[in-house]
Amino acid sequence: MPPALSNISLIRATDDDISFLSALADHPEVEPFLAVGSGDEDVLRGLVSDGGTDRGPRGLFVIRSPEGELVGGLALSVVNHRSRICELSRLMIRPEKRRTGIASAAARLACRTVLVDHSFHRIQLEVYGDNLGAQALFAHVGFVREGTRRRAYWRRERWLDGVQFGMLAEEFVLNPR
């Protein structure tokens, strides 16, 4: 990770962060790559209230730059507590901050939170098939492409594949990049 990005932080979102995250999710350069309704303030509020370390690594997070600036957000949700599986979703970065390494650093921090801090077995995610940037990002971070759900989503007036990625705890520990 570039030295300038070592101070990227993931902080649990609060109600004060909802308007920033909603506006970011609705931004015309961000919204096409998120699930429909990702910027809905009521849904985001539900993710904020769902957070908490006593229930595992879940909730809505803001991403802060080394200077303390809000630059993005992401969500973590427990898919299966018994099997220790968590899902990463809604990774979004302000368009002018893309291609700076912030998204990679944030994804790595999310993996560390889930797999190391909370001792989960697996973290997984899914991206649209036409989102080649996200696919490259997650492969770079160390996720393994596990499959494709063909024509799974009606989005932007066409059917899109869902490309699934996963990472196991031992893969992160062996290759924390």
Image: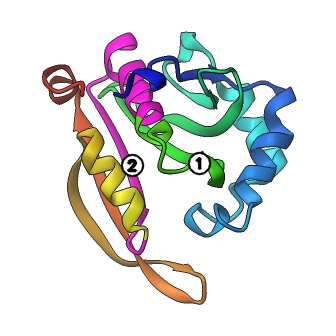
Place residue 162 in its image quadrant. bottom left
Name the residue at 47% across, 50% down. 99
Place residue 69 in its image quadrant. top right
Residue 116 shown in magenta: yes
Along the line of sight, the residue nearer the viewer: 120 or 140: 140
Residue 102, how many percent across, how many down?
50, 37
Q: Which residue, given by chain and number where applicable, does mark 1 sit on?
A: 92
Residues packed near mark 1 inside 10 Å, few (<14), some (14 to 19) or many (20 plus):
many
Q: Which residue, given by chain and number where applicable, does mark 2 sit on?
A: 125
Residue 34, how many percent across, how many down?
59, 61
The earlier-in-sequence mark between 1 and 2 is 1
Given the image, on which type of amino acid does mark 1 rest? Met
Name the residue at 57% across, 23% down. 10
Along the line of sight, the residue nearer the viewer: 48 or 19: 19
Which of the image's four quarters has the N terminus? top left
For this view, does 99 lie left or right of residue 119? right
Residues drawn in magenta:
105-130
Residue 150, how many percent across, how many down?
32, 78
